[in-house]
Image (cartoon, rainbow, N blue to C red):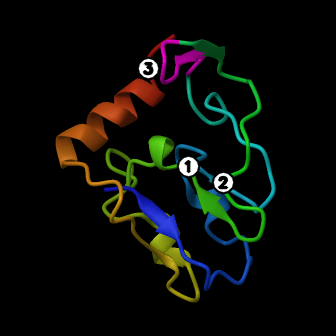
Amino acid sequence: MAIMITDECINCGACEPECPNTAIYEGGAEWTWGGGTALKEVEIDGGEIIPGDAAQTPISDEFYYIVSDKCTECMGFHEEPQCAAVCPVDCCVDDPDYRETEEELLAKKDWLHQAS
């Protein structure tokens, strides 16, 4: 499963630099698929292909947030999700809406960081 940041977030920003996939963004900040990954373009729902550097709508305007489709729970990088390890208020938790197996998370990691 992916990790999510709850509304108990104090916006300290400790989690953001720890993410190997650049899946964590400050509240209100636009995000991109390509940021921190090897993705040059992405096929989104409906078959539309968008550039990896195309700005995407923020998921939260108030708190730091995690883009679930970029979160691999640090699989292939670390033994545990680094955002949760450094969060001083324990608000980086499993997201019950995104259940993924270890194999799926590793496949996502490979997709995000594919060789150019």
Q: Which residue is mark 1?
A: 67
80 left or right of 22? left
Q: In the image shown, does 9 or 17 lie closer to the viewer?
A: 9
* Count of marks, rendered view: 3
Q: Amino acid at mark 1?
A: Val
Q: Which residue is mark 2?
A: 59
Give how far across and how far down residue 28 sits, in percent: 81, 57
The circle on residue 114 is 3
The magenta region covers 39-47
Of helix, strand and loop, which one carries label 2? loop
User: Alpha carbon of mark 2 to alpha carbon of mark 3: how far?
Assistant: 25 Å
Q: Earlier in the sequence, mark 3 or mark 1?
A: 1
Give how far across and how far down residue 3 sits, in percent: 43, 62
Q: Amino acid at mark 2?
A: Ile
Q: Quadrant of residue 103?
A: top left
**Picture layout, residue 33 above or below residue 77:** above
User: Alpha carbon of mark 2 to alpha carbon of mark 1: how far?
Assistant: 8 Å
